[in-house]
Image: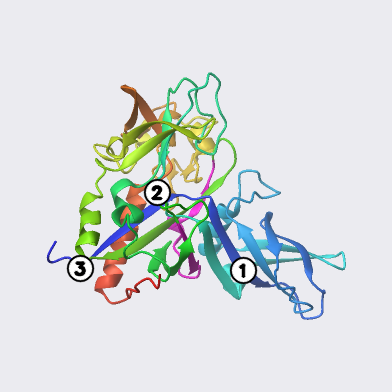
Amino acid sequence: MKDVDVVTAATSSVMSGVSAVFQIPVAEKGRFTRAVKAYINGVPAFPGPAPNERLGLIDVVVYGTSVSINDPEYNGGFLFRDLVEGREVEVVVKTREGFTVSRSLSMHDFTFARMYTFRSCYRNYGAFVNPGKEELETIFAVTPMKGGMQEATFAGCGELNPLANDPELSVIGVGTRVLVNAASGIIIGCGTRSTREHPNLSVAADMWEMKAEYLGGFRTSAEPDAYISIAIPIPIVSEEVLKGLMEAVDEKLPMPVIDTNIRTPIAQDRYASVWQGVDYEVIFNPESCVECDDCMVERICPTRAFNRKLKAGNPVYCTHCGACIHVCVGGAFSGRLGYIVVEGRRIPVVTRFSSRAKAEKLAELLKKRLLEGEFQLAPPVE
């Protein structure tokens, strides 16, 4: 480690506490007094706090988890990805005067676009099971989670997770520069529900330079969620920091196993069970596709990455969650997802809510930008 100055760590995962603030010109000045309600592709966009009286523009806040009034499987997460891709979206504004203004715009037409997270980048998270008898619709499963602990899901990138590599938060804090979905961002503090034992971060980043492969919506059996990706540089400035880095290995990192019904830990495993000896990427074999008229993979794919007609997956959208492996009738998808252990019993993982493949790619991107001088380190101010 003598020749290493900085280690880049990253996570790519479902993170519910995601939002964005937009300023959008929707009409000429004087057309209306102020917006009362707004929607972008049907996703609620909350006007304010500034009234922008008679300016013809709106400031709005959009939650990543807010669901479109037009499509129950489309939410703010999918909207953010569409905007980052440069797609046109339909902006609808209901005015104080009672009439409606609508425009088709892309993010290039917005005058402000910034992502804020209420909580993100947890120091890993945990695994989820259903000990009950009945199937359970939950945000922690893509299809209703089978009872009797027949299957498991999990979240957390293990040894690649930034806060796992700096457990004492020695070099990660307010003011630290980071990458958020490949765009330069900054840590603005700890997030909601953050504790010393289970820290998480609140970050902010302008959306103009974000890349669509690192963010999006994520459909679950309960309602759609959102995922993003964050990379953080960890400069080795002390023996304490070095020790934290050396201790951050999957075999040592605890992974609580949670009863999804009551959100309470019932056992504990290690991240090695789900990230060692597994496949980071899911493989699709088109020759094994039996061309179902009602393709279960297309129906349940959390990120809408698979297209039945094209018999192909979109590598930009795919998070390699593995949900396709267990629902494909023809067995066209393959990959080892690992297992968790509860009282000596191995429970197979059926879906990953984190992508080690995307996290590694973002960590490599941060490394490249550091080496090329495109990204400057910023020590935390507190």
Q: Which residue is mark 1?
A: 22
Above/below status of 38 relative to 133 = below
Upstream in sequence: badge 3 or badge 1: 3
3D distance between C-alphas at marks 3 and 1: 37 Å
Query: Which amino acid lies under the numbered mark 3 shown in the image of this protein?
Result: Asp
Mark 2 and mark 3: Cα distance apart in space: 27 Å
Q: Secondary structure at mark 2?
A: loop
Would residue 30 appear left or right of 155 to someone viewing this image? right
The mark that comes first in sequence, 2 or 3, is: 3
* Foreground disc of the pair 1, 2: 2
- The total number of labels drawn is 3
Residue 5 badge: 3
Nearest-to-viewer mark from 2 and 3: 2
> What amino acid is labelled 2 in the image?
Glu
Percent of width and height locating residue 42:
69, 54
Residue 197, numbered circle: 2
Taking 202 as reference, is 371 above or below it?
A: below
Q: Residue at x 29, y 43 (%)?
A: 253
Rendering quarter of residue 278: top left
Q: Quadrant of the C terminus?
A: bottom left
Quarter of the image where the N terminus is located: bottom left
Q: Is residue 248 left or right of residue 290?
A: left
In-front residue for pair 174/374: 174
Instruction: Identify the amino acid type marked 1.
Output: Phe
Task: List the single residue furthest toward the front.
Answer: 196
Residue 289 place in picture, x, y as percent: 41, 32
Residue 207 is tagged as none
The magenta segment: 201-219
Query: What is the C-alpha distance between the residues marked 1 and 2?
Result: 34 Å
In primary-sequence order, the first of circles 1 and 2 is 1
